[in-house]
Each structure stands twice: as C-alpha cells, then as structure tokens.
Image: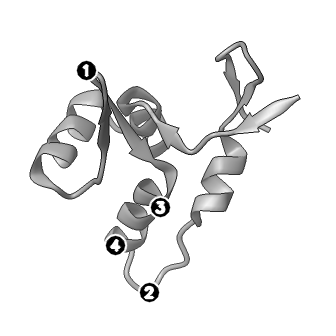
Amino acid sequence: MSALILALTPEEAAKALGVGRTTIYRLMREGALRSFAIGRSRRIPVEALAEFVRAQTPGAEAPGAADLAAHHQVKAGSGEQYPD
C-alpha cells in the first residue's frame, strides 16, 4: 500500500529539480518557492513546486501537482520513497 505525497523536504525538491539543496533554501528564502514549517523542518507543497516550474517555463506545459505527487510515493508507514 502506498500513500500520496503532499509535501517534499528541501532535499527531495532539490532532487526533483536537479539542483542543490542550497538552491532550494535560497529560493524559499527569496519567496520564489513556497514552503511551510513543521517544527524546525521545512516542507514544500508539491503544488508549490509545480507552480515554480510553470513560472520558469512560460508557454510550456509543466507537470501538474498530481503528476509530481504520483511520481513521489512512499511505502505506508516506512517513510521509504520510491518512484512509480
């Protein structure tokens, strides 16, 4: 059984975009990439990542949140991630 991912860690978002973790933290700090806090950790909504990609590619079809979320699933209860 797998669960749908609603938010990514900065490390997961960096991997999805093919950039470094520092770049993700900079984008969050500058307000270019929405995120929220859970305790001392940051999470990036999958939809925010899709919005960021769409904003960077005007006129191009970027993946929607459902596409990104479906690609990042976890085994229920394990926290282990794997693509479809």
The amino acid at mark 4 is: Ala
**Residue on which disc 2 sits:** 59
What distance separates the C-alpha of mark 1 from that of mark 4?
Answer: 28 Å
Q: Which mark is residue 50?
A: 3
Residue position for label 4: 55
Find residue 28 and report its image quarter: top left
Total residue callouts: 4
What is the spatial separation of the Cα atoms under label 2 and label 4, in whole angstroms?
9 Å
Residue at image point 30% right, 46% down:
35
Mark 1, residue position: 40
Nearer the N terminus, badge 4 or badge 3?
3
Residue drawn where x is 58% and y is 60% of the image? 65
Q: Amino acid at mark 2?
A: Gly
From the viewer's perspective, is 71 left or right of 58?
A: right
Circle 1 packing at 10 Å, graded few (<14), some (14-19), many (20+), is few
**Residues at discs 2 and 4 in contact (Cβ within 8 Å):** no
